[in-house]
Image (tube, rainbow, N blue to C red):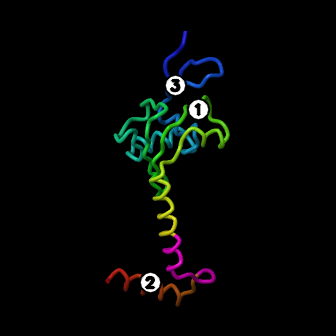
Amino acid sequence: MASKGGRGSTGSDAPDALRLDRWLWCVRLYKTRPVAAAAIAGGHVHLNGERVKPAREVAAGDRLRLAIGGRDLELDVVAIPARRGPAPEARACYLETPESQVRQVRMTEVRRIDALSRPRSEGRPDKKERRELRSLARRQGAD
């Protein structure tokens, strides 16, 4: 007797659907299930364009939109993992959309240019340098 979802399935075949929080944890997008569930509950994860709860089942063919660490990812679910395995197995369960990849390249370039424009000191700033940095920040905030 085949069971529905991921619960109680036996054998080597992978389940056809899995809880969203568990899927995010299994494919290593979040370090723990509670962190994945908190991200979903906080509105950082959308399934097929709508906000969902952590217990919502995800299946192959679904589209996820995630906000992780300042990045906005759009993923297509390709497979449902049978377990939380090694990273190469996890990456095989989803594909990042081409639009999302282009967005990531642009954001990386913006961050790189931003980092180059920030003033850097050799080490910890001394009192004079701290005063100059504060003065610069005030001037830039006033403009």
Distance (Cα) linking label 2 and label 3: 56 Å
Q: Can you tell which mark lies on residue 44?
A: none
Query: Residue sitting at 62 percent across and 35 percent down?
Result: 84
For label 2, the residue is 134
Q: What element carries label 2?
A: helix
On screen, residue 14 versus residue 20, left or right, reads right
Q: In the image shown, does 99 or 107 lie closer to the viewer? A: 99
Work out which residue is located at the far front of the displayed protein and give it.
Answer: 98
The answer to whether residue 112 is left or right of residue 48 is right
| Left or right of 122 on screen, residue 39 | left
Mark 2 vs mark 1: which is more N-terminal? 1
On the image, the x and y values in percent for residue 59 come to: 47, 30
How many angstroms separate mark 2 from mark 1 (CA)?
51 Å
Q: What residue type is labelled 3?
A: Asp
Q: What x and y, as percent, mark residue 83?
A: 62, 31
Write down the region rendered in magenta.
112-124
Q: Which disc number belongs to residue 16?
A: 3
Please, what is the three-letter code of the amino acid marked with disc 2?
Answer: Arg
Q: Residue furthest left?
A: 143
| Residue occupied by mark 1 | 81
